[in-house]
Structure formats: C-alpha cells, structure tokens
Amino acid sequence: MSLVDPRVKKQAEILIDHSLKVKKGEKVVVIGNFQAKDLMLEIYRLLVKSGVVDVINKFDTYDFAETFFKEASTDQINYFPKFDMEEVKYADCYLRIAAPINTRGLSGVDPDKISQRSKVLKPITDYRVEKTRWVITRFPTESQAQEADMSLSDYADFVFSAINNVDWKKQFKEQEKLRMRVDTTQTVRIIGSGTDLKLGIKGRKAVNAAGEFNMPDGEVFTSVVENEANGYITYSFPALYLGREFNDVRLEFKNGKVISATASKNEEALNKILDMDAGSRYIGELGIGNNFNIKKFTKDILFDEKIGGSIHIALGKGYKETKSNNVSALHWDMIKDLRGEGKLWFDNKLVQKNGKWLINI
C-alpha cells in the first residue's frame, strides 16, 4: 500500500469522526471523483475499522452527466431513478467528495434539461438531507487550483488548511453567540456596493454550521420570511451553477420575489434557471460567513460562502430546520463580500462594518 499524505489521513478522520459520527453496524455511501481515490481509500479503511457493515463506494465524473443530458430523451430526463431512491433509503450516512477534473464540464448543457432533472430528483435529495447523516467535502485537483488562480501545491495547502487547521468544536462554541443573536433578530439589512436589501427573519430559526454537513464550514444561516425581501443586491463575485459562470449578477426583490435579474454574462440562462419552478425566485437561505481562516474567493461555493465578512443568499429551496416554507428544486447560493464597504444591520443596530464584527459574538 502506498504512503498516504498525513493531511489526507487527518481529513478522513475529521469526516468520519466529527462530521458523520459513524457508528458500528451502519451502512455508508461514499461517492467521489477518480482524483479523490487516496481520500476515498483512507475513508474506506476507517469505516471498515470502525465496524461499518456495508460501504458502497461509487466513482463519479462529469462525463457521465454530460453524456446523459446531451443524449437522453425527454422520457429519460423525466424518469425517476428507483435504484437511487432505494440506495438513499438503505444508507445511514452519505459522503460526497468533489474532486473535478473539469469544473466547467456541464457548461455546454441546456440549463432547461438540468432544471427538469433537478425537479425529478428532488425527492431523493430531500430524503438524503432530511433522513440521513451527510457531509460534502473537497479534494484538491488541478482544475480547482486553476479556478482559484493557484498552483496545485498552493491550492492543496489552502484546502487542507481550511479543513484540518480548525478546531471544529471551538468553532461551534464561538458561533453559538451569533446564532442566538440571529434568532432574536427580526430584520436584517445588507448595505454595500449596488446593494440595499431588507430581509425579514422573525420567527425563523438560525443554525450553527461547524462541520457536520459541509467540510470546511463556518457559518450561521437561517431562512427569510417568504414575502419579506425588499430592495436590491449586486453580488461581488461571479455566481456559478453547474459549471456555468454568471458575472455582475444583480437581483431586485419585491415582497420576497426576484422581479428583476440581470447579469453581464449569461443573463438569459440566469433567468431560465430562476424560472425553474414557483419557489426558485424566492429566498430559501440567508447565510453569514464566519470562517476568518478562509479569505480568498476560489469559485468554489463550499469555501467561498464561509468567507468571514461575507453573506450569501440562496434562491430556492429552504431548510425545514430553519422553518423555511420555500419549496424548490433549486438551491443556488450567491455571495456578497462586505469586507470593502459593506454594512450589516440586525434590526436597528449596526453589527458589522467592512466585514468586521462590532458586537461580541
């Protein structure tokens, strides 16, 4: 057996022990790209050692999805995959490792087909999120490094540092004050470049995210009262969806709904995605990035939405744990950087300026 990078071993331990808390006798599904073989093998070793009775290892690559969307008939797009549903019902835990060889592999696919397939797969996604213990993570690859404008070695350092160099129990404790503060807030106002947006969150429930479902992690998120978003927001970074990039996205809200969506790149596709279903133009999640170890935008939402001093708003599906009532096959996070000239208000109190907290959280 080849030597394993100790950083890979530590990541595997964090995923199994902290994120999933795997128990003896459980069944686990592990899905990853070929490039993540070392991590998948180390995870498999730990799972067998821990007494897991069944491990389903599946390798994935964008080529299969691209081929499906380009060749599948309408009937095939609309067919519900019963095997996949049975698998997710069978599993106690689900672990997804993204290590793409091509981050833009689906950029040439018709977004209408992707939207329709997302609707079909929604029961499987909902079951996985609500009934299993799950976590998603990353393994560094050349394509991700290129997106982040880094060498592979520098990007690997970035990934492993964001995951392995955080005391996740301590992160959870530190974020509890913020979670409790959000829970007592009725209105959030976001002000920044091209942005003045008011969101009603009264009666919703905030969640402290510290590595149980995302790795890396570091945010507090909640939902927005469905008809209480008014104003406009211009996103600081490109929004990405299934390999397609949308630049200078500006959204205008009235009574909760996006009534105008513009972009300097892929505006038509942006609006097609937002017309996916009845809930896709409403907000499902408001997230506050609180991991100040992640400072650089890398075009990977798993890292970028955690940037300390940023917020993100997800259009579409909300989480039941936050008391969201918004139902959609879409869940699309877009990030607003507040570190330059941003202000964050909780009710009538300025709580963050230029990405720095003004309150004790």
Image: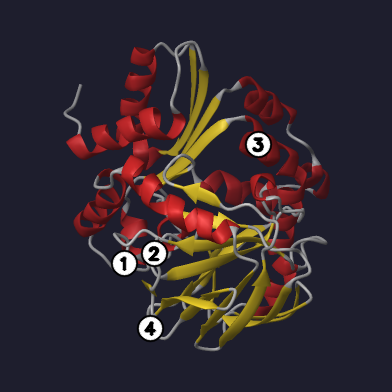
Provide the secondary structure element on which disc 4 rests: loop
Tag 1 near tag 2, CB within 8 Å: yes
Above or below, 165 against 44 in this view is: below
> Could you tell me residue 282's position as x and y percent?
73, 66
Q: Upstream in the sequence, badge 1 or badge 4?
A: 1
**In the visual, does 59 lie left or right of 284?**
left
Which type of secondary structure does the marked residue at label 1 adopt? Answer: loop
Q: Kindly identify which numbered label has been placed on residue 40.
A: none
Marks 1 and 4 close (CB-CB < 8 Å): no
Question: Is the C-beta separation of discs 3 and 2 under 8 Å?
Answer: no
Residue depicted at 42% across the width and 46% down the height: 210
Can you identify the residue that label 3 sits on? 130
Residue to which mark 2 is pinned? 307
Q: Position of residue 41 (x, y in %)?
A: 33, 27
Q: How far is the residue under mark 1 from the one under mark 2?
A: 6 Å
Residue identifier under label 1: 295
Comes first in the chain, label 3 or label 1: 3
Report the colour scheme. Answer: secondary structure
Q: Cα distance, mark 3 to mark 1? A: 31 Å
